[in-house]
Image (spheres, rainbow, N blue to C red):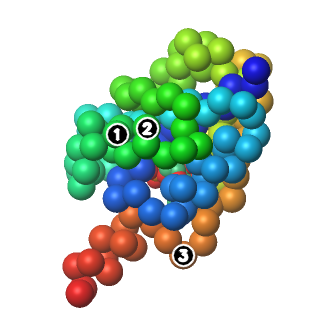
Amino acid sequence: MRTVITFGTFDVFHVGHLNILQRAKSLGDRLIVGVSSDALNFRKKNRYPVYTQQERLSIIQGIKHVDAVFIEESLEQKAEYIKMYSADVLVMGNDWQGKFDYLSPLVNVVYLERTPSISTTSVIEVIKRT
Ligand code: C2G
């Protein structure tokens, strides 16, 4: 049983999110997703997500590629989460390239290319303009 773990805010869910979850799952048998808490997001980006952590958690849990979800309380707890879920592979988008290489003694770290031309910010901008 090969377990893959990934993390993200997944605010205003879009096809880039779906693509990375699908590709992450294809690297193993079981996909675990850490959904960043509202508080973590505020610390990281100085604003709260559009959807609450409970809504974002429910959306991710409903995706067929996802086997289990939990709330990620802090970026620095990745090693703990990896051990807790006995993960073999850590998947991150390549906007995080190199940032989690320090975890490679623990887990196989894989950075996947982001889906071009879509982001939560760009979706919000389009909605604002229409
Ligand atoms: N993503 C993607 N293509 C896009 C947009 C996002 O592949 N066009 C990926 C990101 O690279 C990330 C995941 O979708 O792996 C979730 O994206 P975000 O919600 O932006 O996640 P982020 O805020 O980077 O949180 O512990 C790490 C952080 O919690 C990651």
Q: Could you tell me if the residues under marks 2 and 1 are in contact, i.e. CB atoms within 8 Å?
A: yes
Give the residue number, with chain letter if any, for mark 3: 117
- When the figure is inspected, residue 6 is found, relative to residue 22, above or below; the finding is above
Q: Which residue is found at the position 63% from the left and 50% from the top?
A: 22
Task: Check mark 3 vs ligand 1: CB closer than 8 Å? yes or no.
Answer: yes
Q: CA distance from mark 3 to mark 2?
A: 25 Å
Front residue of this view, candidates 103 and 62 = 62
Q: Secondary structure at mark 2?
A: helix
Residue drawn at 69 percent across, 59 percent down: 113
Can residue 43 be seen in the rendering of this structure? no
Give the numbered dot on residue 58: 1
Q: Judging from the image, what secondary structure is the residue with disc 3 in?
A: loop
Residue 61 — which label?
A: 2
Q: Residue at x 54, y 56 (%)?
A: 18
The location of residue 43, given as percent across then percent down, is 30, 39
Three-letter amino acid code at disc 3?
Ser
Tell me the amino acid under the disc marked 1.
Ser
